[in-house]
Amino acid sequence: MANKYKIFTFGCQMNVHDSEVIAGLLQQLGYEEADELEEASLLIFNTCCVRENPERKIFGRVGNLRQLKEENPRLVIAICGCMVQQPEQLERIRKELPHVNLVFGTHNVHRLPELLTQVQETGERLFEVWDTEGTIVEGLPAARLDGLKAFVNIIYGCTNFCTYCIVPYVRGRERSRQPEAIRREIEDLAAQGYREVTLLGQNVNAYGKDLDEDVTFAGLLRMLDGSGGMERIRFTTSHPRDMSDELIEAMADLPTVCEHLHLPLQAGSDRILAKMNRGYTKEQYINLVNRIRDRIPDIALTSDLIVGFPGETEEDFEETLRVVEEIQLDSAFTFIFSPRPGTVAAKMENQVPEEVKKERIYRLIELQNRISLERNRVLTGSIQEVLVEGPSQTDPDKYMGRTRGNKLVIFTGAAERGRLVPVKITEARTWSLHGELMP
Ligand code: SAM
Ligand code: SF4
Ligand code: F3S
């Protein structure tokens, strides 16, 4: 009987895709995915440490597996991902989770087959975490979760060092993949029947800056447009500071590049933006949004926002509310500032009390929900191009898919998964659009 694995993934799309690579490597070794935890001989926890909560959850979840390991001593329990790149967390795993017998980091995922064999042969605990990034390893397999939409990494790491953020410490400096390697991967995916790709990076629009050849992110998009017949191209995340006019033009021109931009604002107060080291002012962000909307009027704009950054006063927070009201985002991820050990902001004075942070996030969410609903209502009566994903999870008589702006649409009428179909929007809700398939 084949060995079985189960992977638990925390964090962002980068981790989701790393888990697909891990699954690809395991399948090459003859492993199969387990349905139930109990039938697996290998459990892998792919971790995130961007905020404190996911870290706490991981220690809890893995801690609970002690008995399972006692009952099945041959079980391999592995932890990988961003959390283990922090030396103090590695130490904690060593001490507090003695039943974890394999740990590998974000820079040596490709070493998994060898590490796994070693653990199985010696029966000893193995911790291998590289603290610096090597060169990009191309050609790793990926067992993607979805046969329709695929993640494709274009740039690894981040060198921005926003003062609140742990990512540059756990993912290394920015490293762009060669454009040809990206194109080949997308052509391959198109040949396998994929219809949409999302180009991934912590800062996709810094793409190419570290390469010898003269290629920008806008140039890459022009090169990828229509590759192998791929019908939709998306990307995330873009940094406002690196949003060039050349990129806006490329988005406006290229038919397969979707009209969606995730452009984290983080805060609306110039004082806080400077303390965050974001590299733009509120005015610059608003002007940028205006330029983008002038050129691409039907763009869906989404963002990330943080409340309770150290020293954030009520006035600073109200600035964020004012900017959010002005820019009319389609939706936003909102976060409570979480001090991350080792970052500059964690050591700043005037940390905001938890209850103030909570009160602020509720106010921000309430405002953004109202705006999201208004933005969706504007689409009522319009006809949207939807990539059909299959029956709706909440209403199996209906179908679901996403617009070019990445909005979820639930609709009536028989539609085939993988097709791009026109859907007339008849009702708007905060998180979804509802409609009917056009003949
Ligand atoms: N590279 C992207 C960017 O520039 O926005 C995404 C980085 S992170 C994976 C996603 C979001 O988490 C960030 O945009 C930020 O809003 C939030 N975040 C990062 N560090 C945080 C912290 N210490 N506390 C709260 N939110 C945080
Ligand atoms: Fe973190 Fe800033 Fe880099 Fe985004 S751009 S990953 S928020 S340091
Ligand atoms: Fe988390 Fe690492 Fe992504 S810290 S948000 S999984 S890059």
Image (cartoon, helix red, strand yellow):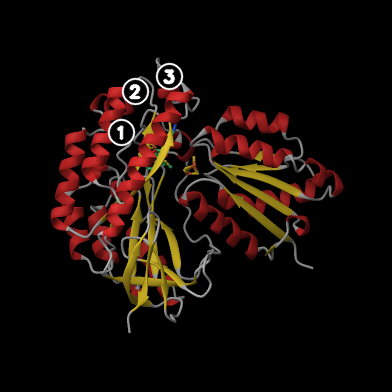
Up-down relation of residue 269 to residue 145 (above or below): above
Q: Quadrant of ligand 2?
A: top left
Asked which quadrant contains residue 368, the reply is: top left
In the rendered structure, which amino acid carries the disc numbered 1? Answer: Ala
Q: Amino acid at mark 2?
A: Glu
Residue 252 in the figure: left or right of residue 228: left
Q: Marks 3/1: CA distance?
A: 16 Å
Task: Looking at the image, tell me whether mark 3 or mark 2 is earlier in sequence order.
Answer: 2
Residue 158: x %, y % from top left: 38, 40
Q: Which residue is mark 3?
A: 351
Q: Estimate the x, y position of residue 371 in percent, counting from the top left.
A: 30, 48
At 14% across and 49% down in the image, what residue appears?
Answer: 291
Residue 107's label in the rendered image is none
> Which residue sits at x=70%, y=51%?
43
Residue 47 position in % (x across, y down): 57, 43
Q: Badge 3: few (under 14), some or many (20 or more) residues near its Cα, within 10 Å? A: some
**Residue annotated with mark 2:** 312
Q: Could you tell me which secondary element the residue under label 2 belongs to?
A: loop
**10 Å crowding of disc 1: few (<14), some (14-19), many (20+):** many
Residue 203 seen by the camera? no
Residue behind mark 1: 267
